[in-house]
Image: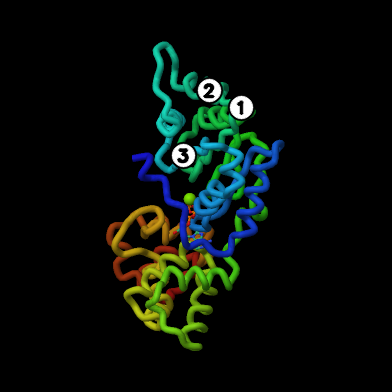
Amino acid sequence: MIASAIPAVPNIFKGREELVEQGVHILCQQSLRFLAILGAGGMGKTSLALHIMNATSVKDKFTGTCYFSPCELFEYAESLIQGLLHIMKLTMQENKSKHEVLFDHLQAACEDVLIVFDNFETPWNHDDSIAIKNLLEKVAQYEKVSLIVTMRGPDGPADIPWEKLGDQSGIPTLAPVPAKEAFKAFAGNKLQNSDESESQIDSLLHQLEYVPLAIRLSAQHVKRVPLKALIKMWEKDKISILTEPTKSGRLTSVSFSIELSIKIFKIEGRTLELLSALSFLPDGIPFWVENLDQMFPEEGLSVSFY
Ligand SMILES: Nc1ncnc2c1ncn2[C@@H]1O[C@H](COP(=O)(O)OP(=O)(O)OP(=O)(O)O)[C@@H](O)[C@H]1O
Ligand SMILES: [Mg+2]
């Protein structure tokens, strides 16, 4: 289960040359051991970590000992440590706790070890005990250990001097040119070449704010729906083009697209609260056009259709 949750290094990966280079440079310095790749969902943090981890000079430094831990599987410190033992192929020993087995292994390491804690927001936000923080800080204490953490949000976890890629809010969205290259690569040969379609793609990508996941999900639709129709879908029902109809999961699901929409459409404050409340009503609000104003008289809610 853990092995199948480890993603392949993505083939289609555009516009991140500089960030990969910075990440590799940081990890290859003797004094810097902690790299944080932060930002909102779907920005490409995991993809970036995989590319950094697979760079030749990183492989040369961490000879054979790069571990990738898909932390979205681990909600608690206990399961995280169990997962680490599994990934490192360590077996339990008599009279030793899991922690001791892990820490003895890290203590005994002669070569540099790289551990990638991917999607660390899952245990970090879920396990509100001090155990996750303690575990991470203890792992970071071993001299031979370097860490990459990818996490949604602007701050790295625990009291660890992280080197962050990007700016204060994390890694940026793609620049327009690589975003378009990525869109075309994901769409494959279904795109016809014309000046009109070029400007349609430009406009769509602009509206998607160049977020990698949104680019991939929308490009998937071009395989089945002509670009013109896709743009109409976007104008009419923005969320539906940000889902992959045949699969479900963090990178394909409606719940993700809602989260992404919250970011893209800058839904916040009272509107976000209202949407959260509505999501608990099984049938929504009956006759909402008439009733919404009465339910929230002081909000002055306007009704918009799309
Ligand atoms: N530079 C890029 N060029 C093209 N596609 C990209 C790029 N970066 C990411 N993607 C694609 O975008 C999608 C989301 O990427 P990824 O899983 O790395 O994001 P994430 O920030 O880790 O998301 P989450 O916060 O949900 O973990 C993936 O399908 C990935 O292939
Ligand atoms: Mg990720």
46 shown above or below 216: above
Ligand 2 is within 8 Å of the C-beta of the residue at disc 3: no
In terms of secondary structure, where does tag 2 sit? helix
N-terminal label among 1 and 3 = 3
Which residue corresponds to the image point at 42% horizontal and 57% vertical from the top-left?
256
What whole-number distance in Å separates the C-alpha atoms at marks 2 and 3? Answer: 16 Å
Which residue corresponds to the image point at 59% horizontal and 60% vertical from the top-left?
16
Q: Which mark is residue 142?
A: 1
Q: Quadrant of residue 186?
A: bottom left
Amino acid identity at mark 2? Phe
Q: CB under 8 Å between callouts 2 and 3?
A: no
In terms of secondary structure, where does tag 1 sit? loop
Which residue corresponds to mark 2? Answer: 103
Amino acid identity at mark 1? Tyr
Residue 1 locus on image (x, y percent): 33, 40
Amino acid identity at mark 3? Ser
Which residue corresponds to the image point at 56% horizontal and 37% vertical from the top-left?
63
Quadrant where the C terminus is found in the figure: bottom left
Q: Nearer the viewer, residue 268 or 44?
A: 44
Residue 293 locus on image (x, y percent): 42, 69
As drawn, is 222 to the left or to the right of 146?
left
N-terminal label among 2 and 1 = 2
Q: Quadrant of residue 87?
A: top left
Q: Is residue 178 visible?
A: yes
14 shown above or below 194: above
Which residue corresponds to mark 3? Answer: 69
* Mark 2 crowdedness (10 Å alpha carbons): few <14, some 14-19, many ≥20: some
* Mark 3 crowdedness (10 Å alpha carbons): few <14, some 14-19, many ≥20: many
What whole-number distance in Å separates the C-alpha atoms at marks 2 and 1? Answer: 9 Å
